[in-house]
Amino acid sequence: MSSSAASAAGEQRISMLKVLNPFHVWALGVGIVLVGEFMGWNFSVAKGGAYGALIACWVIGLLYTCVAMIDSEVTSTVAAAGGQYTQAKHIIGPLMAFNVGLYLVMAYTMLEAADALIVGDLMKSGAEALGYAGLNTQPFVVLTIAFLAWLNYRGVFMTLTLNFVITLVAFAAILVLFIGVDPLNPGTVLKHKELLTDLPYGWIGVVASLQFGMWYYLGIEGTCQAAEETRSAARSIPLGTMGGMMTLLVAATLTWYICTGLMPWQYLGQAYTPLYDAASLLGNPVLQVLLFVGTLFAAVASANGCINDASRAWFSLGRDRFMPGWFGAIHPRYRTPYRAIIFLIPIAVSFAFTGLLDQVITFSILSGLLGYTFMSINMVKFRKKWPLDSIKRGYVHPFHPIPAIVLFVLCSAVYFATFLGYGASLLAIMAFYIAASVWFTFRRYQFVKRADQFTMPWPRPKGY
């Protein structure tokens, strides 16, 4: 055997380890999202009032339930790194796959930058509480991203085991705070009767609040990125994703209930850390410390999961030559996409250093929203090309095509809501992805080997 052939055979044998179970998948999905319960969701209160935020919570919860169901079926069948990107290349085509891969990378990298900014600001607030004013946040931003990237570099099992622990602590902090407000005796601590008002801006305010309602659940679809590293994707992806969605629905509703019963909507709508503020109003120092730690852990868990997901999406683009093949390498010892992890570090740090938290978050939300819109189309084409009796599925979501239709309608409503508040950002982001599509079509597509992309042993699609 020639040296080149031997080398190719060696590279072929290196693959990512299948070590994850449903708890790791749950930790990946919930870990990315839970920071939205500690901050960010409350900006929907400023748009639509307390009741508007609750409507947004449940309407967007329906959107993400559709996302979770669709993802659970398709990913348990297309069990490969890249998640929705891998689904797109098998079901729709290369241009859509490239765009979806880019949506994923940008959504998670932007969210990672926002999480690092939050960690830095939390450390600054903690230092000020101890009497140290003027703390520079940038070293904490770099340290957070660098440490978590190193953790991801060393192995996915350790990374997501840590995420499971710190996510569990953050979720427990919300439950403890809920118990602390004495929910069985309304009016004693919680003052919903006095604080809740009618919709301050009418139904148009409710529509506008849908944009920040996404913050309750943004990122749960990241569970798909773990498909290639689970022991059984058919079991782990549906259990981890649907279990994570149930957890987030409970956490989101409890968060709304606690905060709207302690703070007027005018203050809540612009608060930076609403759950921590709620603990501070109770005057219990133990709860204050617990919610500070919970907020910090939620931000770290989110950034950790984002590094995992963004690197898998970028690695998949490189492995299929949608991006330079150099990025499609797996570490021979740790079995991680180490080049993709390292490459994305300076990008996340650069966006974090801008300090433009609202713009970074908006970029992340809109990138995710574009991906969800694709999923509704993808699901319809998937069922049409490969009916239920043609291939084996790990999970079959019910009521098709209703979830896909509902998802598309709700995505359209959120686009409109985003346009009301961030119209210029929406147009700029759309222009960015159009320019990227033109670049891929005329410059990059020539390097793509179409025949190598189809890795699933499926029969010829129906009608082809």
Image (spheres, rainbow, N blue to C red):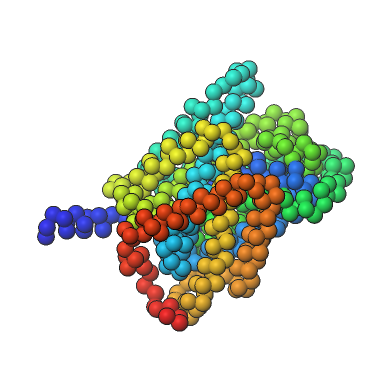
Q: Depth check: 246 or 264 in front?
A: 264
Quadrant of res 270: top right
Q: Quadrant of the N terminus?
A: bottom left
Furthest toward the left, the residue is 1
Q: Is residue 263 left or right of residue 405?
A: right
Q: Is residue 105 visible?
A: yes
Residue at the image position 64 percent from the left and 71 percent from the top = 402
Furthest toward the right, the residue is 194
Q: Depth check: 213 or 425 in front?
A: 425
Residue at the image position 63 percent from the left and 69 percent from the top = 405
Indicate the position of residue 248 as horizontal and vertical percent values.
Answer: 63, 52
Q: Is residue 158 left or right of residue 285?
A: left
Q: Is residue 425 left or right of residue 433?
A: right
Indicate the position of residue 94 as horizontal and vertical percent values.
Answer: 41, 63
Q: Is residue 222 left or right of residue 278?
A: left
Residue at the image position 55 percent from the left and 49 percent from the top = 429
* Residue 117 sits above or below residue 14 on the image: above
Q: Depth check: 418 or 4 in front?
A: 418
* Residue 384 sits above or below residue 451 on the image: below
Q: Quadrant of the C terminus?
A: bottom left
How many labels sit on residues?
0
Quadrant of res 245: bottom right
Indicate the position of residue 382 as horizontal and vertical percent values.
Answer: 50, 72
Q: Is residue 175 visible?
A: no
* Residue 285 sits above or below residue 214 on the image: above
Indicate the position of residue 206 as horizontal and vertical percent values.
Answer: 76, 52
Residue at the image position 62 percent from the left and 46 percent from the top = 424
